[in-house]
Image (tube, grey):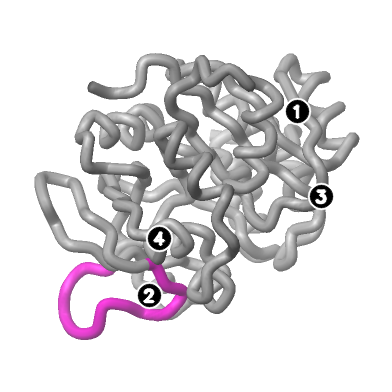
Amino acid sequence: MGPRAPIIVIPARLGSTRLPGKALADIAGQPMTVHVWSRAVEAGVGPVVVATDDEEIARTVRSAGGEAALTTGAPICGSDRVAEALRALDPHGRHDAVVNLQGDNPFLPAGALAGALALLTDVAVDIGTLAALAAPEEADSPDAVKLVGTQIGPARLRALYFTRARAPWGEGPLYKHIGVYAFRRSVLERYAALPPSPLELRERLEQLRALEAGMRIDAAVLDKASPSVDTGRDLAALRQVSSCRQSG
């Protein structure tokens, strides 16, 4: 049985390492976090909350009509921040699943979040996520995280590893990981209770903590990746695309 009462939580902070202030960066007249929140609301899978340690981000979300939860600066990664916010928002565990939607995916395609949640109908799966074929220019980019997995069904992978390096070696498709995690509630609580793992710290990828702890992550493969924002170059390209869409 799949989740009955999921909630979407978007972790957002101003102190991004590669692109400071990313959460409030303007794209087509709206801050990026508001774009992400809007996509999550449109998905229609459950209530949406932005979890942040920054008052300005919280005010921006609330002025757009959204809900924001203030967290401390202590969480190590986005999923830790999501877990902290959820403990305050839902102490009685009414929500049996939570989607961590990372705040750098302002144009996630319709149906993507539901696709990640649908993976949890398999009782063996702890976390559902998303992937898409990597573009040629992403193959060797450390900003494009690669998912190494084995195909277990149509448009579905079981994740074996995540890395910023080009992987796997040799001929064949490379998959780019998309920053969405659908957790069973109990799995998120277990995850957040663990210390950061060695590979998580080495690759700077939070999902490796789950794999090192023996959790199973499956990925739904999308037909096309949505653009994410990791660097100033990504932001400039996304602004240009948004401008073309508006003028067209």
| Helix, strand or loop status at disc 4 | loop
**Pointers 1 and 4 in contact (CB under 8 A)?**
no
Q: Which residue is mark 1?
A: 69
**Which of the two discs, 4 and 3, labels the residue nearer the N terminus?**
3
Where 209 sits versus 114, above or below? below
**Which of the two discs, 4 and 2, labels the residue nearer the N terminus?**
2
Of badges 4 and 3, the one in the foreground is 4
Is residue 169 rendered magenta in the image? yes
Q: Which residue is mark 3?
A: 73
Look at the image and tell me whether residue 244 can be seen. no
Q: Residues within 10 Å of mark 2 (few under 14, many from 20)?
A: many
Residue at the right extreme, as displayed: 55
Occupied quadrant, residue 242: top right
Q: Disc 1 marks which amino acid?
A: Ala
Of badges 4 and 2, the one in the foreground is 4
Q: Horizontally, is 22 left or right of 128 in the view?
A: right
What numbered label is drawn on residue 213?
4
Of badges 2 and 3, the one in the foreground is 3
Spot occupied by residue 24 in the image (x, y as percentages of width and height)? 78, 43
Residue at the left extreme, as displayed: 153
Spatial distance from mark 1 to mark 4, Cα to Cα?
A: 28 Å
Spatial distance from mark 2 to mark 3, Cα to Cα?
A: 33 Å
Magenta stretch secondary structure, dominant: loop
Spatial distance from mark 4 to mark 2, Cα to Cα?
A: 27 Å
Spot occupied by residue 134 in the image (x, y as percentages of width and height)? 34, 64
